[in-house]
Image (cartoon, rainbow, N blue to C red):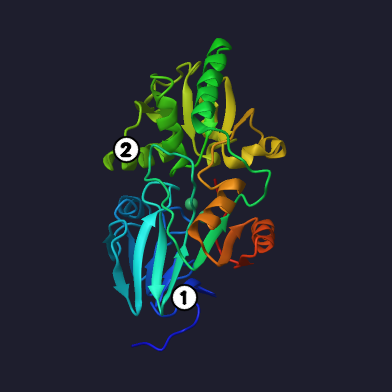
Amino acid sequence: MSAFSGDLVVLTPEGLYCPPGGFHIDPWRPVPCAVITHGHGDHARAGMGEYHCSSGSLPILRWRLGEQRYHVHAHGEAFQLGDARVSLHPAGHVLGSVQVRIEAAGQVWVASGDYKRQPDPTCAPFEVVPCDVFITEATFGLPVYRWPHTPDVAADIVDWRRRCEARGEAAVLFCYALGKAQRVLAEIGAHDDRPVLLHGAIATGVQVYRDAGVALPATRPVAEEEKGRDFAGELVLAPPSAAGSSWMRRFRRAQTGFASGWMRIRGNRRRRNVDRGFVVSDHADWPDLVRTVRETGARRVIATHGDTDALVRALCEEGIAAEAFRTGYGDED
Ligand SMILES: [Zn+2]
Ligand SMILES: [Zn+2]
């Protein structure tokens, strides 16, 4: 028996570390053993000795990190790492995203990774996992962040495309290539059966989702369209990095939009220099962050990234012992 009685997750220079289990969660520096919550670049990095992940994340990690020593686990199926009993539970963020449940020394800790509570047709819904300590993200940890119903936003995007068509313009929508693009596609498919054109960086991720059995509407790669064609009335999905690049020149007349939780704030749309902002987020909004903490029943909460201060303050006011870790995760959405 181990005599371990401290915290099940601590912050080290490499990332979140579980001392009784001898593994890191989404480390940002190379370590021998990593449990990965999902495939976004700030959570799944190269250079780890071994990777533990969900079956849904495996094709994404293979796409982004190539062949590695992967150990794949089904949702809810416990496995042993050192003196810790570990299991992975859906986080509702992107395909394959999971929370990490750790049981050791008579305690249960859950590290959420990134998560959301809104329905998403492209991934398994978030599961509330009761725990003593909940480690939560707080990307949108301010009360101003409240998400509209995503099907309504998808209808707005389709309406925007029609208006662009009437003006002889293409509608180029920027969104992150892993997760957001596929979710937007799936939501749009319910309102519009016209094929959507894809930038190459997004086409690869769309294929990974299709191979995993996620139903998505018809798409075509922009690169295979006839040279010099008129893109009026087409909806095109492209990664944010394509904004302002020479790739955009093929659309002689185009409106641009950005699908992100950050679009909730008007100034962010101006800063991004896009014509339209559509509020679609793969992270929990403020009410869902607070609700989720309550639902886990955790007595103690550690916020890892985003606007952690406001969340920590609000939870402390509820009598929950809340604090923040300074981590290496980004705020992409
Ligand atoms: Zn993420
Ligand atoms: Zn993140």
124 with respect to 152 (left or right): left
The structure residue drawn at horizontal position 44% and vertical position 43%, both measured from the top left corner, is 179
- Residue 198 in view: no
Query: Residue reaching furthest right?
Result: 267
Above or below — where is 170 with respect to 285? above
The structure residue drawn at horizontal position 54% and vertical position 28%, both measured from the top left corner, is 153
69 with respect to 117 (left or right): left
Kindly identify which residue carries mark 2: 214
Kindly identify which residue carries mark 1: 8
Question: Residue 122 placed where, x, y %?
Answer: 38, 39
Structural distance between the alpha carbons of marks 2 and 1: 35 Å
The structure residue drawn at horizontal position 54% and vertical position 18%, both measured from the top left corner, is 159
The front one of 51 and 55 is 55
Front: mark 2 or 1: 1
Above or below — where is 259 with respect to 61? above
**Mark 1 is on which residue type?**
Leu
The front one of 37 and 258 is 37
Quarter holding the C terminus is top right
Q: What label does residue 257 carry, if any?
A: none
- Residue 110 in view: yes
Q: Are marks 2 and 1 in contact (CB under 8 Å)?
A: no
Quarter holding the N terminus is bottom left
Label 1 neighbour load within 10 Å: few <14, some 14-19, many 20+: many
Dot 2 lies on which element?
loop
Going from the N terminus, do you reach mark 2 or mark 1 first? 1
On whether ligand 1 comes within 8 Å of the CB at mark 2, the answer is no
Dot 1 lies on which element?
loop
**Mark 2 is on which residue type?**
Val
Q: Residue 3: which quarter of the image?
A: bottom left
The front one of 3 and 173 is 3
